[in-house]
């Protein structure tokens, strides 16, 4: 690993802290292409953490170290990059901007105490970023905005600022305004609106500082007044606004102090223009991150319980308190093995100290409940893929542990003598199924091993072994997520293919029918003799199966009647016309014959199955398809397109209403056949420019249209 550090050009000291007040945990968020990774790389270089900044296009950035990220030239996983500024350690959590990797974003939000929204001055704000802003607002997370890519020919800071104010709401105000150079096009400086100082980057980073030219003052006065009024409105000093309105000059030190408090409380949201390529605004942004954003001491520790689920006394960010930490991300490093990113919320995590690891409540995602005691030999400060050993991690800090045999994403780490569970964060449901098949028997073993690793690190990935369709299905967040998952499986030495996902259907009878089952064989010794006659009747949906005995006179001995039922049930499981289970029928045994010597349990089982098959051949059968209840959240402008699309999917819209969460979005409620939803996660995203989301739940089974059912039957017959 030391060699890997040298390759990345790490130059700065290993950041270890003793005081949570000297830590800032900042999640960097924004849409794909906004420049998050490039900005983090520039901050690493500006603080001396690395010798020089890498480039996304060259695959040389610190945080995009995953091979899939290098190949796709975009972040696909959460990555931590700590920097030191003014004696404060800032853990920058770089997150993917693409919607498929929202699980990585959720993990970053869990580990952070504040969020830096990165908005491109070329592309503006998308709907997903606006929705994320509201999500942060709901939990009171402090936020700031960095407007990037100011060196682009189409960059427009003022237009981007107005877009941010429209999307994010009140108190989104700039602390600085860009200043053009002598050519009138390139941004070469910043004007600080609070202090009226000019930061000139024309000679590079760090900037020279001077007073503004007199002709610049009138142009910035309106922005200066708006900023002061916004800061004073959030001041805890209720007399400050009266003093300002009366014309009193408020001291700059008072304004800055109130600004920092308002940002830390999450009621004021500063905007900083930055350019990663030229270094413009990096120092100003670092000041906002260290002076404005809160330390972990101001962050409420999530609720905890004991292992049995009983409430535990509330904890706070205290290095001397009980140990409670959480695994926010687990990855598999080709050199080190399992690496887990851990946020310490209380206590101090030390090497070689016994700890308890608990993971509960994720069994449906492929994470069985587990509890184990472990010792971590080493703790590391992560810098992308590089690991630098540290002696301990105090409450509020983020570290990496290696070679844990049980730790998975979402697990709680606590003291061995006081084991606890932390309330989990909300993970989105994966909605795109991908059916995979190992090419050889040896690949099946490698596939099982690699799947276990992937599921341990990615809670948004759900593994399903469908007993009805006999397919191994990976439920992913979208196509990009699926591509990364499949790539990681193949890079782990697994040869595999994908195949169309099959939806588990049902068969039933559409009308009453009768069947005659005769199984008579004689071949030396005891023969086989069993005859039975049955009547099959359809039942209402969801009724299941009923077996009725109406044998009179003992024509079928009493001890063989359960055998007939067993044979009927077995044939129902195998299906009649398309290989799917038969449901919602009543089978009545009303006649038959037996032989005193050749009849047997096995013979009557066979006869029962034959009778049901004949009843299906003679009668009317139909296929039932699962119907899902679907809730779709989309911006108002896409409602018409979504409803039209649902109609084309044989869906039935039950209604729509304004989304309770707001954001000028609509919640559409519908029922849609599950066969029409296999790729809906991809198609909805394309239809709504990435802003639409949906959830689904099984509702019932309904008859499949005849032309579709016939196609399924023909396909089944051809495969036999």
Image: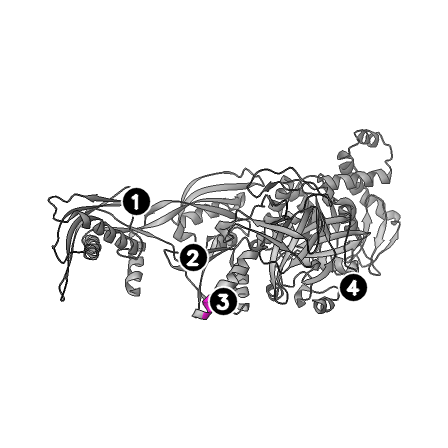
Residue tagged 2: 465
Tell me the residue at 70%/68% (across/down).
4
Q: Name the residue beneath numbered marker 1.
A: 544
Indicate which label's residue lies in the foreground, 4 or 2.
Answer: 2
Dot 1 surroundings within 10 Å: few (below 14), some, or many (20 or more)? few
Q: Which residue is mark 3?
A: 446
Magenta span covers which residues?
442-446
Q: Disc 2, disc 3: CB below 8 Å?
A: no
118 lies left or right of 611: right
Residue with the mark numbered 4:
11
The secondary structure type at the circle numbered 3 is: helix
SS for callout 1: loop
The mark closer to the camera, 3 or 4, is 3
Q: How is the image coloured?
A: one colour
- Left or right: 105 as drawn, with respect to 701: right
Q: Nearer the viewer, mark 2 or mark 3?
A: 3
User: Which numbered disc, 1 or 3, marks the residue that appears first in the sequence?
Assistant: 3
The answer to which of 640 and 419 lies nearer the viewer is: 419
What whole-number distance in Å separates the C-alpha atoms at marks 4 and 1? 69 Å
């Amino acid at each position: 690993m030391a060699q890997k550090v040298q390759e990345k050009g790490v130059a700065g000291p290993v950041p270890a802290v003793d005081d949570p007040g000297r830590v800032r945990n900042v999640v960097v968020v924004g849409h794909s292409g906004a420049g998050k990774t490039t900005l983090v790389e520039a901050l690493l270089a500006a603080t001396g953490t690395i010798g020089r900044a890498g480039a996304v296009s060259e695959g040389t950035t610190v945080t995009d170290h995953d091979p899939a990220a290098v190949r796709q030239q975009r972040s696909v996983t959460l990555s931590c990059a700590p920097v030191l500024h003014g004696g404060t350690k800032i853990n920058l959590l770089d997150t993917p901007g693409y919607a498929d990797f929202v699980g990585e974003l959720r993990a970053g939000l869990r580990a952070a105490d504040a969020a830096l929204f990165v908005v491109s001055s070329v592309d503006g704000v998308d709907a997903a970023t606006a929705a994320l802003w509201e999500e942060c607002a709901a939990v009171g997370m402090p936020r700031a905005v960095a407007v990037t890519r100011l060196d682009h020919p189409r960059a427009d800071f003022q237009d981007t600022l107005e877009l941010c104010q429209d999307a994010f709401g009140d108190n989104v105000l700039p602390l600085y305004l860009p200043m053009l150079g002598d050519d009138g096009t390139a941004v070469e400086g910043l004007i600080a609106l609070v202090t009226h100082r000019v930061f000139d980057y024309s000679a590079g980073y760090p900037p020279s500082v001077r007073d503004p030219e007199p002709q610049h003052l009138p142009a910035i006065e309106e922005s200066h007044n708006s900023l002061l009024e916004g800061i004073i409105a959030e001041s805890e000093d209720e007399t400050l606004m009266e003093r300002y309105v009366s014309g009193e000059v408020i001291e700059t030190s008072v304004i800055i102090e109130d600004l920092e408090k308002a940002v830390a409380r999450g009621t004021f949201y500063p905007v900083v223009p930055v350019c990663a390529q030229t270094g413009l605004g990096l120092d100003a942004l670092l000041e906002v991150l260290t002076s404005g954003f809160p330390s972990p001491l101001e962050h409420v520790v999530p609720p905890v319980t004991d292992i049995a689920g009983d409430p535990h006394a509330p904890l706070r960010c205290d290095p001397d308190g009980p140990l409670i930490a959480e695994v926010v991300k687990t990855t598999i490093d080709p050199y080190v093995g399992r690496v887990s990113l851990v946020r310490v919320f209380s206590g101090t995590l030390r090497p070689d100290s016994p700890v308890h690891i608990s993971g509960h409540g994720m069994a449906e995602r492929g994470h069985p409940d587990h509890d184990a005691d472990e010792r971590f030999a080493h703790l590391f400060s992560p810098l992308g893929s590089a690991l630098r050993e540290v002696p301990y991690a105090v409450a509020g800090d983020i570290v990496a542990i290696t070679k844990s045999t049980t730790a998975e994403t979402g697990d709680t780490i606590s003291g061995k003598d006081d084991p606890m569970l932390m309330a989990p964060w909300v993970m989105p449901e994966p909605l795109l199924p991908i059916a995979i098949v190992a090419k050889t028997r040896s690949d099946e073993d490698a596939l099982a091993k690699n799947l276990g690793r992937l599921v341990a690190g990615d809670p948004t990935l759900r593994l399903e072994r469908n007993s009805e369709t006999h397919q191994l299905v990976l439920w992913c967040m979208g196509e990009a997520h699926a591509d990364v998952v499949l790539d990681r499986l193949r890079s782990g030495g697994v040869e595999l293919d994908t195949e169309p996902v099959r939806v588990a259907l049902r068969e039933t009878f559409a009308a009453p029918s009768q069947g005659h089952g005769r199984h008579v064989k004689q071949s030396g010794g005891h023969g086989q003799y069993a005859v039975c006659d049955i009547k099959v009747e359809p039942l209402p949906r969801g009724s299941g199966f009923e077996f009725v005995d109406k044998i009179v006179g003992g024509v079928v001995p009493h001890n063989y009647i359960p055998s007939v039922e067993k044979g009927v049930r077995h044939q129902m499981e195998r299906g009649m016309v398309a290989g799917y289970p038969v449901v919602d029928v009543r089978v009545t045994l009303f006649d038959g014959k037996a032989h005193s010597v050749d009849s047997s349990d096995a013979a009557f089982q066979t006869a029962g199955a034959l009778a049901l098959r004949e009843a299906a051949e003679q009668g009317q059968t139909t296929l039932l398809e699962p119907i899902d209840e679907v809730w779709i959240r989309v911006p108002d402008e896409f409602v018409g397109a979504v409803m039209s699309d649902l109609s084309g999917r044989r869906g039935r819209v039950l209604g729509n209403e304004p989304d309770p969460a707001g954001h000028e979005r609509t919640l559409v409620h519908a029922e849609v056949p599950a066969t029409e939803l296999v790729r809906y996660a991809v198609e909805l995203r394309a239809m709504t420019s990435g802003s639409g989301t949906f959830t689904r739940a099984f509702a019932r089974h309904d008859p499949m249209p005849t032309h579709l059912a016939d196609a399924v039957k023909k396909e089944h017959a051809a495969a036999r």
